[in-house]
Amino acid sequence: MKIAVLTSGGDAPGMNAAIRAVVRSGTMYGHEVYGVKDGYKGLVEDEMILLTHQSVSGMLSKGGTFLGTSRLPEFKEIEVRQKAIDNLKARDIEALITIGGDGTYRGAMELAKMGLKVIGLPGTIDNDIPGTDFTIGFSTAVQTIVDAIDKLRDTSSSHQRVSIIEVMGRHSGDLAVYAGICGGAEFIITPENPMDKADMVAKIKKYKGEGRRHAIIVITEKILDVHALAEEITEATGFSSRATVLGYIQRGGQPCPEDRILGSRMGTYAVELLNDDIYGVCVGIRDSRMVHLPFANIIGQKRPKNELYSLVKKIS
Ligand code: ADP
């Protein structure tokens, strides 16, 4: 069988491990694997190359995605998707493996509805995809944020400061919760766990009274203006506060072992699903096992609330 593989939407460390696994396991099972450049754009513009065992050599440890990624809003139009399908047909490519986030899944489901054999892999640092405990890239991003929190704590403590750290996550607080726990944050504010400002101010005043030298607040992006919050905290508590927006560094870096393993497992599992004539599904990891579910069961669904959040109140 000829199989195409692409990465789309936001990049995430470990995507290369997943591509590599598709190529290596695909070749091992006797398939031909084509790499599509820059996500759905490469499908529409017919930018695909045959990948061999050798093409993915040295990719496991590299961050980002060597195939490139892009955003292509026009892919929502059926005529644009038809062009992608025609290009694949002209090359006798029967199946497509997509690696990306929620938007990429939506595009993949539309292609599946048009008759293409599609498998989706969850590649996003946000861990915001239902049907999987973890997404490819999440663990590495947590590690990056924890490194930043550790550094900010050093300077916060020296200056007796409250540090507010804004992290990514879109609608999911998982990055903030995991990194906040690892970094010993006093407060974690996420879309699922809103801020109780009065309580926070009271606690920070108490900490100051106790002689604590720092406090860490980790907050998911797009909830509020963190610089304005820093000013409010400084005014209300007398404890000087500064905000740091971590931004795009959270997407980069060498994938950590968990993401290399997850990408390797998911990429291989996707090929094995195709071997078994299973498609129209997305891959996940549940209780350490590979699983798959139809796109329709995943898209638009909510992930269960992160149970780890309750820990923060007990140990901060
Ligand atoms: P992510 O996959 O990281 O969530 P995006 O939301 O930007 O990133 O989605 C990636 C790409 O998926 C979009 O640029 C677009 O090409 C495609 N896409 C998103 N939503 C749809 C949709 N409803 N129908 C078809 N394609 C879509």
Image: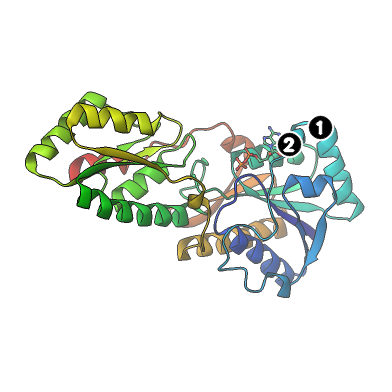
Q: How many marks do you count on the picture?
A: 2
Front residue of 221/161: it is: 161
Residue 66 lies in quadrant: bottom right
Q: Is residue 152 left or right of residue 98?
A: left
Rendered image quadrant of residue 271: bottom right
Q: Identify the coloring.
A: rainbow
Residue at 46 percent across and 53 percent down: it is 141
Is residue 5 visible from the viewing direction of this image?
yes
Q: CA distance from mark 2 to mark 1?
A: 9 Å
134 lies above or below 103: below
Q: Nearer the viewer, residue 192 or 280?
A: 192
Residue on which disc 1 sits: 78
Which quarter holds ligand 1?
Answer: top right
Check contact, mark 2 vs mark 1: CB within 8 A: yes
Residue for badge 2: 110
Residue 204, quarter of the rendered image: top left
Q: Residue 104 in the image: x percent, y percent?
A: 65, 42
Callout 2 secondary element: helix
Disc 2 CB within 8 Å of nearest ligand 1 atom = yes
Residue 258 picture location, percent across and down: 46, 62
**Tag 2: residue type?**
Glu
Q: Nearer the viewer, residue 52 or 168?
A: 168
